[in-house]
Amino acid sequence: MNHSADNKRIAKNTFLLYLRMLFNMVVSLYTSRIILKILGVDDFGIYNVVGGIIVMFTFLNSAMAASTQRFLSFELGKRENIHKVFSSSVLIHRIIALIVLLSGETIGLWFVNTQLNIPSLRMDAANVVYQCSIFICLLNIISIPYNATIIAHEKMKAFAYISIIETSLKLVAVLLLPIFSSDKLKLYALFLLGISIIIRLLYTQYCYKNFPEIRGKLHQDKALLKEMTHFAGWSMLGNIALIAYTQGLNILLNIFFGPAVNAARGVAVQVQNAINSFCTNFQTALNPQITKSFASNELAYMHQLIVRSSKFSFFLLLILSLPVLIETDIILKWWLGNVPDYTVNFTRIMLLISMIDATSNPLIISAHATGKIRIYQMVVGGILLCILPISYITLKLGATPEAVFIVHLLIVCIAQFARLWVIRPMIKLSLKYYFQQVIIKIGLVFFLSIILPFMLYKLLSITWWSFILICCTCVCCTIFSIYTVGLNKEERMFIQQKVQSFRKKI
């Protein structure tokens, strides 16, 4: 089958998402600096750890979000039962929202007020942040079916425009904070709640206007509800692991070291998210095609999408991450001025974790596409769940805060090989093919890219000129390595044709 139309749509969607990402990244990095300055290290840390508590109750929602996305994309691939899937997902997410509300206002509230390491004078502000976080979370939960419908239909323009509106509103909120004399931490949380309400209304209105299949009375299909919840039930294990090694580790750092270390992690997460958005946008455009190709039984095309998504996601991250990995300390100092302790090491390790995770996403989507994820989640989710208890033991033995991220990195590497082993028979993927096209190529590209920049970093003193030289060297070495080693003959020919076409236009 000719997939040129699909490839063009992927390219167009990726371009739109990159425009959105570039705007969001610039604004996000700027606002992070301002927020850290306005709130201070301790309040910034409190916001990160308290706002993350409610996320711990959303593991069921995350599982259902994956289930909704998978079933909508699958049915679009077959062009059947779209309204039934949407109706079922709306009902399920309303129930999840109620469960999260009850859990958050009981267990979560008790945990914030009795277990976290928060100065007594800031407990009132911490509770305001927590309540706003609960309602922001509820809005996100009930909006999942609408957002999943947009992604399944590959209407990325909506995400691009609405996301730019959201980011712009957050920028305005940050700029307004110094004007008011009230508690800045409380005010910031209330601003974010108001923005969430506006954005949820925009997404919902867009869906009702553009997707006729979601209108009308919601239908309850018991068989479909059972199938979706069964899928989500096994997805839950992986999402519990995700919550454990994100918010769980954040809480561990708070208990052992206090809010200042949470602030360091918060800054590192901002850098990680900004760089991750490059490959996330690329994968968001590609993910529905992976599921649809499985639904239409085009496994060869599916394997091609998996390999290219894994490889190109890693390459995109490497181009951006390598300068940051080498020049982390000076970049953070110029960006923030006052850099919280441990931030440099946190950022470097988390970027390495992101590169591994970038190659795992296409495999995760392919596993979801099959609908048979019980063994996958038991093996991979079980391995990832080990991150939290092992990190706790290392901290109990007196390790430094960096130890939890090193544990995370090592276990993520183990989980990736386990993921390949489990998925191979599910989608008939050749391990030899995957290793040759992905693992070996990205390993060689990484090794060749880092040699010269690292030598320059060690030899040169810290100046503006050395910084610019090292960053340019990183980009040039990475692009050269990708072109000569990372791409196959067909991909190099494609790039050559595009370059020649561009020259003719000039």
Image (tube, rainbow, N blue to C red):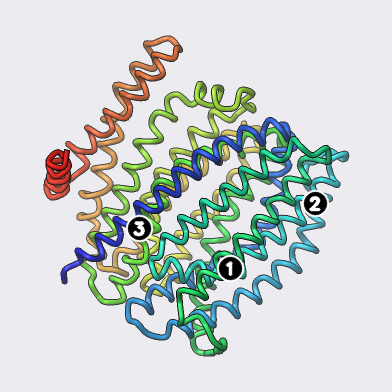
- Give the residue type that dot 3 points to: Asn
Q: Disc number at residue 175?
A: none
300 to 184, vertically: above or below: below
Query: In the figure, is residue 502 to the left or right of 199?
Result: left
Residue 332 pos. (x, y %): 54, 26
Q: 1 or 360: which is nearer to us?
A: 1
Q: Secondary structure at mark 3?
A: helix
Residue at image position (58%, 68%) is 143
The answer to whether any part of residue 405 appears in the image is no
Of the two numbered discs 1 and 3 on the same chain, state the one appearing first in sequence.
3
Of the two numbered discs 3 and 2 on the same chain, state the one appearing first in sequence.
3
Residue at image position (21%, 54%) is 432
Density class for disc 1 (Cα within 10 Å; few <14, some 14-19, many ≥20) is many
Q: Disc number at residue 13?
A: 3
Q: Which residue is mark 2?
A: 128
- Give the residue type that dot 2 points to: Val
Residue at image position (23%, 38%) is 482
Density class for disc 3 (Cα within 10 Å; few <14, some 14-19, many ≥20) is many
Q: Which residue is mark 1?
A: 143
Residue 366 pos. (x, y %): 35, 65
